[in-house]
Image (cartoon, rainbow, N blue to C red):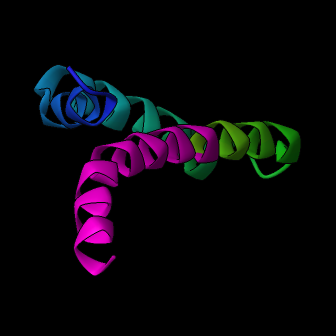
Amino acid sequence: MSPSDRAKNLLLDDFFTGLVEAQKDVYKSYIFGSADHDVEGRERALVKLRAIEEFHASIQSIAQNSEIEKKRFKVL
């Protein structure tokens, strides 16, 4: 199975997508529900949230890679 197919399977997996969304919600709730003086805590939660979003985006990119390759060969 190609990396693109494996990435597509991950994105279609309800458990995986639910886990990613649940983790994002944890960090969002901390950011929005933290005390006013806890700036460092919000910054750490934001860094973690961005890391999860970038990880998810990289999986999406890998999943779309096969489509990009197909289009590239048609142009050349």
Q: Tell me where residue 21 appears, x and y as whole percent.
A: 33, 37
Asked if residue 6 lies left or right of residue 30, the reply is left
Q: Percent x, y for residue 26?
A: 47, 33
Magenta span: predominant SS is: helix
Classify the position of the C terminus by image quarter: bottom left
**Left or right of residue 9, residue 56 in this image:** right
Task: Report the residue at 65% width, 36% height from top.
Answer: 48
Q: Please name the residue shown 20% across and 37% down the image.
A: 8
Quarter of image, res 44 = top right
The correct choice, above or below, for 9 with respect to 69 in the image is: above
Most foreground residue, 37 or 28 = 28
Res. 1 image quadrant: top left
Q: What residue appears at the point 20 percent right and 32 percent down from the top-left corner?
A: 5
> Residue farthest to the front?
76
Q: Is residue 15 above or below residue 58?
A: above
Count all numbered tags in the image, as a single digit. 0
Instruction: Give the left or right position of residue 36, taking residue 33 as reference.
Output: right
Measuring from the top left, give residue 28's x and y in whole percent: 51, 46
Percent from the top left, x then y, of residue 63? 29, 44
Task: From the viewer's side, name the closer residue of 31 and 4.
Answer: 4
What span is colored magenta in the figure? 50-76
Check the image and name the residue furthest to the bottom: 75
* Most foreground residue, 12 or 42: 12
Magenta region includes residue 59: yes
